[in-house]
């Protein structure tokens, strides 16, 4: 199980919680499990997210390994100028 | 030869990295030989032009182009209907891009494209535009972000809001974002003082000197070529292919030299129209925007309205911070308010913090990314309130920022715990600089502000070819908007151990390399640089392999040092080292060409922080500001080419000066843009500016082999705030509305004096 | 569109008179070409006056200077005689556009473009300059303030062309100055502007004055009440306050992208005060 922090406006779609526990060994599994367990997160997951793992931000990296004690943070999909 | 993982930071004694060689594109640019978007021509080429809505908001009842089509010399006319076939297959984001490029049922802003023509000359094209009859039903419009949020505001789209927007809001409110942690109510209760203020900023354009331009040529077989000024030609290819219903492989896009982008060229405007016209006319079509079109129909950044509340103890510790940010992003969803809300307090270690961002649509051109999109306005509001608290407590603004500065291990306001970051180092550098303690005269003020930007990596593909004469050709897929070809040459030369001028870097077309993300997010020196280093190491592995075969020893027994393959040690045997040139010269006989490749989705772009220090003088009678002195302190991780790093620092500061003092979109009552030109859209001119002093701070990014952090965007985050703090000090009144044009400053001074 | 570049003034007048469509005179072209490129105008005839030799002359005349209509602002800025006699006028000429623009732009063209914000206007009006106009009916000479009638509309009749400007002679102990407010430091258009010309008597008291304002009304203004406030005074604080108030009273500006009614009205007085003090200093008076 890993713990993932979600941003404030997603809380409502996740039963009011800001930290979710899911069974996932990598980012792909994390996003799949979040979508399956919290269907109301799906519109945002479909629009795209970034995932921060231990301070390193990934835009698209399915196979990034997640550890039990990793700090995992869901972020809006990042872009720039 | 082990291939380093980028995480294994290898700080070494650089030979070429950190030097300041001449840029390879320099001579072409100063002699006029460089080819920009409008510099390409083709036989039989037509001129494409766009008819634009004069109304801020209007239903398009009908378009009759028969007279224009009948005009001799007109070869094609395209309207929204020509894109009808592909519309259904597009996702929301792509559909918005299409509707922005060519209006469908409504014109959503002054300047919105409603039709395009291709003709044999400018004159005929101009006449043709006049012959197109558009029947508009003019609708009420809304321009201001706060006005657009009102329940009775004119509505742009019936169904643009997503599930994040609670019920009961105007349909113009399309997204809501919330970030933060802790308990702000508890934090505010712990404060000795709380300051809460509202700020407004006006829309600012990126102000690139080169207008959008392209040359499209599509044959009857559907194969097409596009020459275009862009920050990302792969993005152009994918977007245009989708909007025209083409296979990506049928469209080859070549990026021209680029006269500035700053984020504004990370999308398409005229490119799909040029391709559609070329397809219809069967001839190449060149389109070049006028400056007026650039202002009216390409993306400035959002205007904003922001409330910030900060609580502080009398010792200067921030106990709680909250912000509500409202950004209008033009006629479509997608203002960068989430980045504003994420970055607003990102420079500080705050226990109780909350931000809410509202994305709002209004009858203005669709915003486009502009350098650290969304962050400068948020930093302006936050740093202004911190400045005010420092003044109220009579605390040193630099010490207060150091006391609250985010450091390694701080959990940021957007949830991520920072690794190694350099904010404190930039503040310490500022404190040590003579600027910080220099004397000020009457009507002068000093402002300090900090800024943060995420920085990104992204998809990157690089190819490095070793030529038989010992030189190297490097192909990258990221347009060079800030000297990146020079930096790539430096990194390749550094790895290979050859001279800088033995490497030539080109920006390859979309058929020559795999996908590359747009040049954005300050990512190129980081991501293309990382890929270049890896490609060079890939080539080195092959060079060592060839040497091993020539010596008849194991590949593992060969090492690469300073441009030479050498036996790894005594056991490997005794051979004269072989240079890159010597191995390359016989490559045909040792297995063929030698090349290195990288395909990567780069992550680990280190966050970048900056501190800006600025002195200004205000003429109290006229409200006019003079910037007297400006110093930028920014963490670059590792400066590959210090001159171009300094250039990025200076450029960000200068664009910030324009945004802070005079740049703004000004609309009339009729919703038409009043200042679509550089005369009345006032970017700073050289004589407005002092020399922008720079201090490069280097706190290496563990995510890059040389420690690089992107530098292009962070530099525009602190200036609005730093200048506002400086001007507020000089004018002795808090300036809460940007730009601080002379009339606004004079009015604030008068009001403060009770006149 | 036809382009003509006659060598004789007479021929120029004839071409202009004969044109049935829209005709535009091309001197420096720094306004005309911008209007053409932005497609605001589509003239039938463009008449270039730069081949007419007399148009390029700066000649001493009756103690003053006659300046040909095609003399560039840069050339004017390098003319020692004009600079010494009318520094405020030259200062206006060298504020227009940029260094490059000044190499082409002319004071006469700036005046004929008839912008209420033209830099040439307040300085020339304050200087009491006159404008020589050639036309099918002969030559006439009018004061500089008579040229701009309304934004974009000048006083030239069909077939008429400005031939030269005349800056008059002036008594000893005279000075003039021109100031404008622009948000930038150069390459901009006046939000408000003020020109002041004055003469001092042997005691340093103002004996004659002219005050003009730009960008505060549909046309550049000569403000006689402001000048009257200066005459007989030594420009002390109280007098300057009256000057500023008279300027504010004369303003009839608009709110637009460049400034507000309130701002223009207030700052007109500020600039007039500052210009008056500079003119006084140039005239050798109290600084």
Image (tube, rainbow, N blue to C red):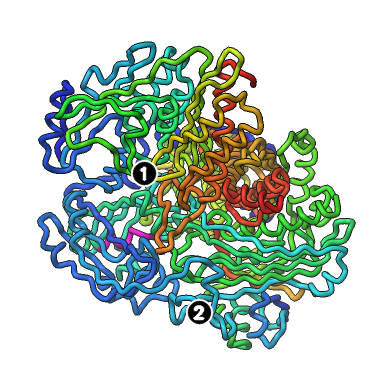
Q: Characterize the local packing of mark 2: few (<14), some (14-19) or many (20 or more) Cα atoms within 10 angstroms.
A: few
Query: Which sits earlier in the primary sequence, circle 1 or circle 2?
Result: 1
Q: Which mark is residue B152?
A: 2
Q: Does the magenta stretch include residue C151?
A: no
Q: Which mark is residue B36?
A: 1
Q: Does the magenta stretch include residue B275?
A: yes
Extreme residue toward the right, this view: B315
Distance from label 1 to label 2 (Cα)?
Answer: 46 Å
Q: Residue at x 60, y 64 (%)?
A: B305
Q: Nearer the viewer, residue B507 or B128?
A: B128
Q: Which of B302 and B595 is in front in this view?
A: B302
Determine whether B172 is above or below B275 in the image.
Answer: below
**Which of the 4 quarters of the picture holds residue C287?**
top right
Left or right: B431, with B279 as reference point: right
Residue C221 % position (x, y): 43, 38
Residue C151 can be seen in this image? yes
Q: Residue at x 86, y 54 (%)?
A: B393
Determine whether B137 is above or below C83 in the image.
Answer: below
Q: Nearer the viewer, residue B268 or B751?
A: B751
Q: Which residue is drawn at 38% across and 62% down?
A: B110
Determine whether B24 is above or below C203 in the image.
Answer: below
Residue A12 % position (x, y): 66, 85
Q: Report helix, strand or loop for mark 2.
A: loop
- Stretch in magenta: B268-276
- Chain on which label 2 sits: B
Residue B735 % position (x, y): 66, 53
């Amino acid at each position: 199980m890993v713990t993932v922090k979600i941003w404030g406006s997603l809380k409502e779609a996740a039963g009011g919680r800001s930290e979710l526990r899911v069974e996932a060994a990598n980012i792909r599994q994390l996003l799949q499990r979040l979508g399956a367990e919290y269907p109301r997160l799906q519109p945002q997951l479909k629009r795209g997210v970034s995932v921060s793992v231990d301070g390193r931000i990934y835009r698209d990296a399915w196979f990034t390994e997640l550890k039990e004690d990793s700090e995992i943070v869901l972020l809006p999909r990042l872009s720039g100028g | 030869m082990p291939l380093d993982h980028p995480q294994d930071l290898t700080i070494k004694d650089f030979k070429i990295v950190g030097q300041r060689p001449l840029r390879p594109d320099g001579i072409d640019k100063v002699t006029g030989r460089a080819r920009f978007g409008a510099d390409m021509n083709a036989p039989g080429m037509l001129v494409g032009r766009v008819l634009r809505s004069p109304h801020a908001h209007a239903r398009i009842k009908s378009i009759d182009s028969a007279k224009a089509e009948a005009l001799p010399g007109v070869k094609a006319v395209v309207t929204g209907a020509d894109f009808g076939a592909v519309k259904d297959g597009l996702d929301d984001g792509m559909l918005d891009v299409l509707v922005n490029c060519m209006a469908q049922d409504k014109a959503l802003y002054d300047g919105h494209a409603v039709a395009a023509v291709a003709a044999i000359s400018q004159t005929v094209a101009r006449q043709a535009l006049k012959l197109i009859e558009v029947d508009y039903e003019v609708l009420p419009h809304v321009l201001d972000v706060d006005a657009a949020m009102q329940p009775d505001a004119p509505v742009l789209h019936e169904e643009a809001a997503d599930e994040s927007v609670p019920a009961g809001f105007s349909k113009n409110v399309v997204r809501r974002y919330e970030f933060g942690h802790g308990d702000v109510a508890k934090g505010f209760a712990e404060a000795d003082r709380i300051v809460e203020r509202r700020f407004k900023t006006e829309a600012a354009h990126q102000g690139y000197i080169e207008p959008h331009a392209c040359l499209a040529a599509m044959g009857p077989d559907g194969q097409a070529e596009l020459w275009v000024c862009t920050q990302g030609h792969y993005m152009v290819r994918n977007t245009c292919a989708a909007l025209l219903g083409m296979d990506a492989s049928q469209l080859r896009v070549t990026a021209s030299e680029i006269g500035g982008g700053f984020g504004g060229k990370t999308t398409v405007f005229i490119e799909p129209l040029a391709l559609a016209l070329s397809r219809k006319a069967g001839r190449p079509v060149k389109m070049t925007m006028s400056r007026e079109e650039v202002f009216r129909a390409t993306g400035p950044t959002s205007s904003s309205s922001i409330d910030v509340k900060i609580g502080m103890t009398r010792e200067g510790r921030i106990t709680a911070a909250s912000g509500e940010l409202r950004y209008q992003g033009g006629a479509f969803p997608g203002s960068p308010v989430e980045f504003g809300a994420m970055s607003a307090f990102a420079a500080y270690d705050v226990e109780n913090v909350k931000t809410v961002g509202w994305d709002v649509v209004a009858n203005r051109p669709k915003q486009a990314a502009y350098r650290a999109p969304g962050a400068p306005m948020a930093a302006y509001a936050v740093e202004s309130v911190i400045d005010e608290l420092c003044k109220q407590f009579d605390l040193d603004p630099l010490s207060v920022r150091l006391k609250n500065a985010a450091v390694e291990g701080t959990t940021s306001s957007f949830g991520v715990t920072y690794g190694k970051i350099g904010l404190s180092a930039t503040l310490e550098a500022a404190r040590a600089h003579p600027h910080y303690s220099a004397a000020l005269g009457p009507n002068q003020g000093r402002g300090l502000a900090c800024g943060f930007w995420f920085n990104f990596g992204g998809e990157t593909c690089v190819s490095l070819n070793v030529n038989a004469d010992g030189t190297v050709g490097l192909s990258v897929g990221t347009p060079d908007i800030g000297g990146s070809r020079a930096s790539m040459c430096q990194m390749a030369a550094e790895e290979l151990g050859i001279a800088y001028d033995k490497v030539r870097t080109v920006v390859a077309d979309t058929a020559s390399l795999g996908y590359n993300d747009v040049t954005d997010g300050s990512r190129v020196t980081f991501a293309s640089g990382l890929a270049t280093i890896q490609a060079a190491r890939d080539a080195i592995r092959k060079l060592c392999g060839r040497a091993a075969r020539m010596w008849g020893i194991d590949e593992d027994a060969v090492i690469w040092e300073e441009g030479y393959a050498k036996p790894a040690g005594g056991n490997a045997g005794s051979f004269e080292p072989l240079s890159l040139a010597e191995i390359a010269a016989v490559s045909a006989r040792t297995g063929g060409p030698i090349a290195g490749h990288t395909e990567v989705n780069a992550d680990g772009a280190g966050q970048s922080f900056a501190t800006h220090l600025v002195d200004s003088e205000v003429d109290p009678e006229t409200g006019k500001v003079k910037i007297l002195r400006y110093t930028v302190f920014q963490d670059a991780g590792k400066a590959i080419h210090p001159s171009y790093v300094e250039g990025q620092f200076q450029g960000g500061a200068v664009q910030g000066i324009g945004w802070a003092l005079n740049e703004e979109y000004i609309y009339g009552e009729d919703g038409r843009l009043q200042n679509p030109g550089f005369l009345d859209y006032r970017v700073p001119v050289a004589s407005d500016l002092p020399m922008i002093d720079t201090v490069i701070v280097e706190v290496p990014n563990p995510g890059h082999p040389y420690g690089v952090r992107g530098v292009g965007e962070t530099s525009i985050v602190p200036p609005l705030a730093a200048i506002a703090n400086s001007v507020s000090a000089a004018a002795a009144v808090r300036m809460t509305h940007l730009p601080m044009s002379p009339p606004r400053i004079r009015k604030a001074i008068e009001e403060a004096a009770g006149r | 569109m036809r382009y003509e570049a006659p060598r004789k003034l007479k021929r120029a007048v004839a071409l202009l008179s004969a044109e049935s469509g829209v005709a535009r005179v091309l001197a420096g072209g720094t306004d005309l070409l911008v209007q053409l490129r932005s497609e605001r105008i589509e003239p039938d005839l463009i008449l270039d006056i730069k081949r007419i030799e007399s148009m390029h002359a700066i000649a001493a005349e009756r103690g003053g200077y006659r300046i040909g209509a095609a003399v560039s602002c840069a050339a004017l800025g390098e003319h020692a005689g004009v600079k010494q006699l009318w520094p405020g006028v030259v200062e206006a000429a060298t504020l227009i556009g940029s260094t490059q623009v000044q190499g082409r732009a002319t004071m006469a063209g700036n005046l004929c473009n008839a912008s209420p914000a033209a830099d040439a206007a307040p300085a020339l009006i304050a200087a009491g300059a006159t404008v020589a106009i050639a036309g099918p009916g002969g030559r006439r000479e009018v004061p500089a303030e008579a040229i701009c009638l309304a934004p974009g509309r000048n006083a030239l009749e069909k077939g008429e062309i400005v031939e030269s400007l005349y800056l008059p002679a002036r008594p000893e102990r005279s000075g003039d100055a021109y100031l404008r407010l622009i948000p930038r430091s150069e390459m901009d258009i006046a939000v408000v502007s003020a020109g002041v010309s004055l003469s001092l008597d042997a005691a340093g008291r103002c004996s004659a004055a002219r005050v003009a304002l730009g960008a505060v009304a549909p046309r550049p203004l000569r403000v006689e009440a402001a000048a009257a406030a200066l005459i007989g005074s030594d420009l002390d604080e109280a007098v300057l306050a009256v000057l500023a108030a008279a300027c504010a009273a004369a303003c009839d500006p608009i709110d637009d992208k460049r400034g507000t009614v309130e701002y223009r009205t207030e700052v007109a007085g500020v600039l007039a005060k500052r210009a008056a003090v500079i003119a006084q200093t140039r005239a050798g008076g109290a600084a």
